Image (tube, grey):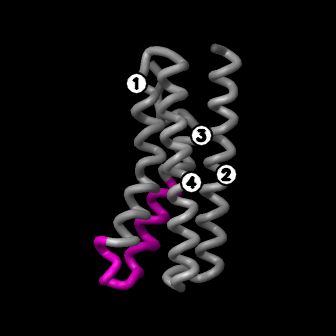
Amino acid sequence: MRSFRNLKVWQKAHQAALSIYKTTRDFPKEEIYGLSSQLRRAASSIPANIAEGCGCNGSREFARFLEIALRSANETEYHLLLASDLQYLKRDAYLELNNQVIEIKRMLTILMQKLSADG
């Protein structure tokens, strides 16, 4: 069994989720059950799926959870774009968060490729 806390990709995903939670506090109140909630759920799903996958017995099953985390990262990336376009996020905040998500996606892809090669 792997310890998810030792994975750099989990650490980065956790930090991104924390940042997104803090950032969405400033969204309009009418978005509390809309975009704020969607963005928070998508962002927190990334490290949650990595953590859940670490409890799996084999690399193939772990990779499946990493794929789900990658899908959540794509969803997060879109919700950040939407928040930016709606002007809920300032440009610099959007770029910083978006770059974090892109880095997480890259790291997930590399880890999935490694698991596939170790097969």
Name the residue beneath numbered marker 3: 8
Q: Which residues are magenta?
A: 15-33
Name the residue beneath numbered marker 1: 55
Pointer 4 or 1: first along the chain: 1
Query: Mark 2 belongs to which amino acid?
Result: Glu
Q: Which mark is residue 74?
A: 4
Residue 110 location, x and y as percent?
69, 35
Element type at mark 3: helix
Pair 3/1: label in front: 1
Residue 30 location, x and y as percent?
31, 83
Q: Main secondary structure of the magenta part?
A: helix
Measure how far apart labels 4 and 1 are at the Cα level. 23 Å
The answer to which of 103 and 79 lies nearer the viewer is: 79
Pointer 2 or 1: first along the chain: 1
The answer to which of 4 and 115 lies nearer the viewer is: 115
Query: Mark 4 belongs to which amino acid?
Result: Asn
Name the residue beneath numbered marker 2: 103
Query: Mark 3 belongs to which amino acid?
Result: Lys
Q: Residue at x 59, y 75 (%)?
A: 93
Q: Which mark is residue 32?
A: none
Element type at mark 4: helix
Q: Residue at x 63, y 22 (%)?
A: 115
Measure how far apart labels 4 and 2 are at the Cα level. 12 Å
Measure how far apart labels 2 and 1 are at the Cα level. 24 Å
Q: Quadrant of residue 94?
A: bottom right
Q: Are marks 2 and 1 in contact (CB under 8 Å)?
A: no
Query: Mark 1 belongs to which amino acid?
Result: Gly
Categorize mark 4 by other alpha carbons within 10 Å: few (<14), some (14-19), many (20+). Answer: some
Residue 57 location, x and y as percent?
44, 15
Categorize mark 1 by other alpha carbons within 10 Å: few (<14), some (14-19), many (20+). Answer: some
